[in-house]
Amino acid sequence: MDRINSWKWVPEDCELHEIDPVEFMGVMRDKRIGFVGDSLNENFLVSLLCILRVADMGAKKWKRKGAWRGAYFPKFNVTVAYHRAVLLAKYEEQPKQLEIGERDEVKGVHRVDVDIPAKEWADIGGFYDVLIFNTGHWWGYDKFPKESPLAFYKGGKPIVPAPDMLDGLQIVLKNMAAYIEKEFPKTLKFWRLQSPRHFHGGDWNQNGSCLFNDPLKKSELDVWFDPSNNGVNKEARLINQLIVEAVRETDIQLLDLTHLSEFRADAHPATWLGKKDAVSVWGQDCMHWCLPGVPDTWVNILWQLIRFRLATR
């Protein structure tokens, strides 16, 4: 474990300072920060909470406004929380009603209302001063197979012709970006680009692994991630293209942490968790990140951007 924590990302042509928890709290005094999205944004939040804990040992758990988890720091009156909304848009499972004797491979659908935010974050308007959004890691046929596909609705009616998974994602991204810009006009808004996965030899449910002790070399990245090379984890870059297009001409700032994270095939929980827990059941985790580790670098970058943006307002 000491080895995977020994690497430090050093940007070219600029200096990246590590976050000072007390300074951060001073700047964010009387403010609230929210993360909205899937478990990779939760991974991001946990890193931030761990870092900020030393600034206020009186921190308390916080789960209001539909938040999945969070913390309140009374010394500075700062709230940091995470709202779990894996598709960002509202979705619900609708089992198929079969007639007597009828057989069908489709067990039901997951209805996605592309123009309605998930209830977990639908009522947070005006509450947060800073918001960080993400989605993308649930947009795959491993999560929504042909037996229970996504069905896309807009204005309460099915979209015709029915979009495929990637087209549906693009529609959701555009609608959610427009909703965010409209409903949070005074909030400092970030959209985090994809966190790269490092599954090799199969996906998370196909015995994929990431048994690496060192970061990838620059010459290896395109083999892993370039769509034109049919990289084994090309989805991250494909989805990033859709996100960039969706937030274009909005006031949502892109938080691009993808490329720097692509190198770190060694920094996932993988087999570090041991044999007596989820690894023995589900296989290696080559998606989430060890703490301390890569998300701490994300926090440092986010902090620099927040401090700069708040100072220029």
Image: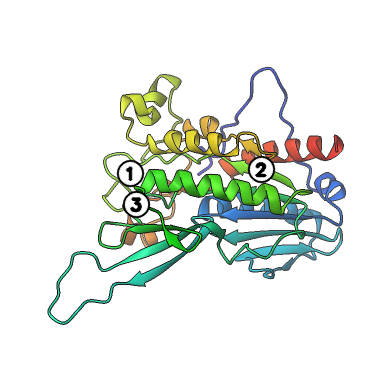
Question: Which comes sooner in the sequence, label 1 or label 2?
Answer: 2
C-alpha distance separating marks 3 and 2? 30 Å
Image coordinates of residue 252 in percent, x first then y, are 67, 40
User: Compared with residue 21, is residue 229 higher up or lower down, i.e. above or below?
Assistant: above
Q: Residues within 10 Å of mark 2 (few under 14, many from 20)?
A: many
Q: How is the image coloured?
A: rainbow
Give the camera-side residue of 17 and 150.
150
Is disc 1 placed on a helix, strand or loop? loop
Regarding residue 265, the answer to whether it shows in the image is no
Disc 3 and disc 2 in contact, CB within 8 angstroms? no
Q: Amino acid at mark 2?
A: Phe
Q: Label 3 belongs to which residue?
A: 162
Q: Label 2 belongs to which residue?
A: 190
In the image, what residue occupies the spot 19% across and 64% down?
105
Image coordinates of residue 43 in percent, x first then y, are 56, 52
Q: Residue furthest bottom?
A: 100
Question: Which comes sooner in the sequence, label 1 or label 3?
Answer: 3
Question: Which comes sooner in the sequence, label 3 or label 2?
Answer: 3
Q: Amino acid at mark 1?
A: Ser
Judge depth for marks 1 and 2 and give the one in front.
2
Q: Label 1 belongs to which residue?
A: 209
